[in-house]
Image (cartoon, grey):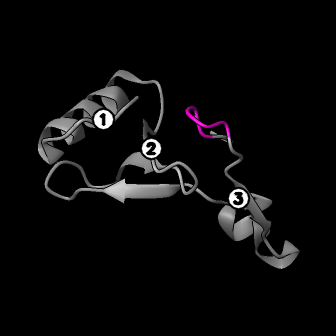
C-alpha cells in the first residue's frame, strides 16, 4: 500500500540510502504506522495513517481482514475501514 485508503495521503517516505536499499528491499521508507497486538497476532495487524489517524487492514486477504475485525473487537471501539 502506498497511500491511505481514507485520506489518500502518500505513505511513501524519505529515500533509503542506496547502500541500505538491499537490506530493506525497497528504495523508500514507508510512513504508515504498523500496529501490533501480541495477544492477537505476532506481527503487524493493522496500519494507522500518520496524517488522518484512521486504521486499515494490512491487505485484502481473508486472514488480514479477520485480524482487522479481531482488533476492532479487541479495542472495543469502532475503527473505520
Q: Could you say where residue 71 lies in the image, as x and y percent from the top left?
A: 22, 41
Q: Which residues are magenta?
A: 4-8
Would you name the residue on which mark 3 appears? 25
Q: Could you say where residue 61 lies in the image, as x and y percent from the top left?
A: 42, 24
Circle 3 packing at 10 Å, graded few (<14), some (14-19), many (20+), is few
State the CA–CA distance, disc 3 to disc 1. 26 Å
Question: What residue lies at 83% left-to-right and 78% top-to-bottom?
Answer: 19
Q: Earlier in the sequence, mark 3 or mark 1?
A: 3
Q: Could you say where residue 47 lies in the image, as x and y percent from the top left?
A: 45, 48
**Circle 1 sits in a helix, a strand or a loop, which is it?**
helix
Question: What residue lies at 73% left-to-right and 61% top-to-bottom?
Answer: 13
**61 versus 19 height, above or below:** above
Q: Main secondary structure of the magenta part?
A: loop
Task: Report the mark closest to the observer, 1 or 2.
Answer: 2
Task: Report the mark closest to the observer, 3 or 2.
Answer: 2
In the image, which disc is placed on residue 57? none
Q: Are marks 1 and 2 in contact (CB under 8 Å)?
A: no
Q: Residue 81's quadrant in the figure?
A: top left
- Work out whether residue 66 or residue 18 is closer to the camera in this orientation and state it: 66
Q: In the shown orientation, is residue 7 left or right of residue 17?
A: left
Would you name the residue on which mark 1 appears? 68
Task: Report the mark closest to the observer, 3 or 1.
Answer: 1
Residue 5 is inside the magenta segment: yes
State the CA–CA distance, disc 1 to disc 2. 12 Å
Would you name the residue on which mark 2 appears? 54
Question: What residue lies at 71% left-to-right and 47% top-to-bottom?
Answer: 10
**Circle 2 sits in a helix, a strand or a loop, which is it?**
loop
Amino acid at each position: 500500500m502506498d497511500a491511505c485508503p481514507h485520506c489518500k495521503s502518500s505513505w511513501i517516505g524519505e529515500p533509503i540510502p542506496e547502500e541500505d536499499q538491499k537490506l530493506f528491499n525497497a528504495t523508500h521508507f514507508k510512513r504508515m504506522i504498523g500496529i501490533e497486538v501480541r495477544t492477537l497476532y505476532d506481527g503487524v495487524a493493522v496500519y494507522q495513517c500518520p496524517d488522518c489517524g484512521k486504521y486499515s487492514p494490512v491487505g485484502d486477504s481473508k486472514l488480514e481482514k479477520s485480524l482487522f475485525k479481531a482488533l476492532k473487537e479487541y479495542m472495543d471501539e469502532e475503527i473505520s475501514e
